[in-house]
Every structure is written in C-alpha cells, then in structure tokens.
Image: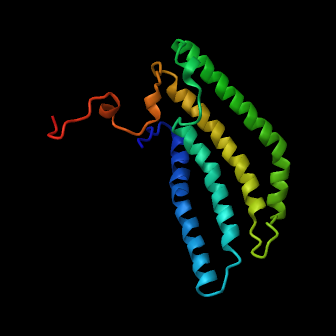
Amino acid sequence: MVENERTGFIDLITWGFSRIAMWAPAFIVAIMFYEVVMRYLFVKPTLWVNEMSLWVAGGVYLTAGLYAMQQRSHIRIFIIYDMVPRWVQRVFDVLSVTCLCIFVFAVIWGGFGEARDKLLRWETFGTAFDPPIPATIKPLILLTLVFLALQAISNLYHDWNKGPEIHSVTDDLDMPDEVLSGNPPKPDGN
C-alpha cells in the first residue's frame, strides 16, 4: 500500500496514532497467546487478558478511522462525483466536511457530560480485573471525533487546489498498473 503524503500538522498527529495502532493488534495476539499458554499448559488462567484485549482493540478501532480519513480511503460513491466538474466536486467536499463537523459537534454536545462523569468517577468495567475502560474509552471517542473533524478540514484545505479526480474499478485492486492495463512486463525486463 502506498500512503498519502503527510501534508500538515494534523496529518502528523494522525500518522503518529496510526503507527502506535498498527502494532497494537500484535500486542493483543501476544497477550492472548500468553492467556492460552497459561490456561491450558499451566492451568492458571489470567484475570486481565480478556479486558486488556478489549481495551486495546477499542483504541485501535477508534484510531483506524482517523487513519482512513488521513489516507482518503473512507467510503465514497464516485459515480456522480467523477461526472461533475471540479468546482462541483469542491461543493460536494465542503458539504461532506460540513455534515461531518455537524455530526461531531452533535456527538460531543450529547456525550460530553457522560464522558466527563465517567472520567471523573474513574468508572471501571466491573469485572475481576476491573480496568477503567469506560473512564478512558468514552473520552477517547470524543477526542478522536475532534481529530477526525480536524483531519477532514485539513484534507479539504490541502486537496482544494488538486485537479479533478477520476476513479476506476481498478483503483481498489492491489496490482501494478502494467498488469491492470493488460501489458504485463516481459520476463527479460523489456
């Protein structure tokens, strides 16, 4: 996969989150492997692995959306978008970012009190390990949404003067352009 270039300060923050998040699944696999070994070989199951994997996976899930936004790989319907001139594409982009910002504002407006209360109470999960998953994930949701809106605005700003984008079915295929065009390179390299 070829990543989009980092174009601004928000891209650097998103890129940093994504680099941490890309190693987190390996951490989850490692602690689950540890749990299996402890449970079935030593008959000493852990209290913390299940909740820790949920906690870390929640963070990965949230930051994956940020990375998708920074890479411009979020879901789009290009049928109409590609048929219109660039100025109309810009209108679509502004409408999209505006709708996203309204959504983010509404979620933060509605969820801030609950997230603040869970954080201040240091609300825990209610299990034997009892990690503070609600106290950390609820505020992280709101913080991630703020960064998501900032990333969308940054993308709009940095993509404003780009030329019109034309998409094809082959954009989603992970193959070299020569193979997709029907002219694969010859074995002798010519």
Q: Quadrant of the C terminus?
A: top left
User: Looking at the image, which residue is at 60% across and 34% down?
Assistant: 152
Q: Nearer the viewer, residue 172 or 150?
A: 172
- Colour theme: rainbow
Vertical relation: 4 (above or below) 41: above
Q: Quadrant of the N terminus?
A: top left
Instruction: Name the side, left or right, on which 148 lies relative to 158.
Output: right
Vertical relation: 162 (above or below) 23: above
Q: Quadrant of residue 100?
A: top right
Q: Count numbered badges in the picture.
A: 0
Q: Position of residue 188 (x, y in %)?
A: 14, 40
Vertical relation: 18 (above or below) 11: below
Vertical relation: 69 (above or below) 183: below
User: Looking at the image, which residue is at 55% across and 46% down?
Assistant: 14
Q: Nearer the viewer, residue 114 or 34?
A: 34
Q: Position of residue 133 (x, y in %)?
A: 74, 62
Q: Position of residue 32 (x, y in %)?
A: 60, 71
Q: Position of residue 97 (x, y in %)?
A: 65, 28
Q: Quadrant of residue 58?
A: bottom right
Instruction: Name the side, left or right, on which 98 lies relative to 189.
Output: right
User: Looking at the image, which residue is at 63% across and 51% down?
Assistant: 61
Task: Return the residue found at the far bottom.
Answer: 42
Instruction: Name the side, left or right, on which 64 lies relative to 139.
Output: left
